[in-house]
Amino acid sequence: MKNLLPVGIILIFIGIILIMISSFQAQKANVKGAGVVFLGPIPILGFGNDKKLIYILFGLGMLIFIIFEILKKIKLE
């Protein structure tokens, strides 16, 4: 485990460097994004700049909620 810490730190720095290089080479692009906020296992809030992505993520959030509930009932039995 102790040997993995330097590897993780090196990978983080490589990722930061790659992001910086790509930001200098980036052209204008139409970027769309969305997210869902969970309160416990329940999705409560969707946000983003594309309605279609918000609906997809909220549907995935509901699917995750259903999976949590199924797993909880299985664990109780």
Image (spheres, rainbow, N blue to C red):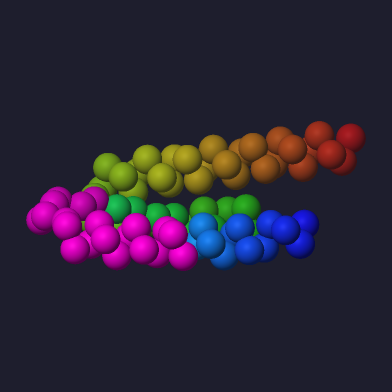
Dividing the picture into quadrants, the one containing residue 36 is bottom left
Q: Is residue 72 visible?
A: yes
Point out the residue furthest to the right here: 77
Q: Quadrant of residue 18?
A: bottom left
Quick check: 5 left or right of 53?
right
Residue shown at 47%/40% (left/top)?
60
Q: Residue 64's image quarter?
A: top right
Looking at this view, name the residue that lies furthest to the left: 28
Instruction: Please state if 22 lies on the left or on the right of 26 as rendered.
Output: right
What residue is rendered at 29% in x and 53% in y? 33
The residue segment tinted magenta is 13-32
Q: Quadrant of the N terminus?
A: bottom right
Percent coordinates x, y for residue 28 in the rendering: 10, 56
Q: Is residue 7 magenta?
A: no
Instruction: Looking at the picture, tell me which residue is in the foreground, 55 or 21.
Output: 21
Which residue is painted at 36% across and 63% down in the image?
17
| Left or right side of 54 for 2 | right
| Left or right placement of residue 14 versus residue 41 in this view | left
| Residue drawn at point x = 60 percent, y = 44 percent | 65
Q: Nearer the viewer, residue 10 or 26?
A: 10
The C terminus - image quarter: top right
Q: At which x and y percent is residue 74? A: 81, 34
Q: Report x, y in % for residue 72.
A: 77, 42
Residue 20 colored magenta? Answer: yes
Decide which of 66, 1 is in the foreground and name it: 1
Majority secondary structure in the magenta region = helix
Question: As rendered, which of 29 and 52 lies closer to the eye?
Answer: 29
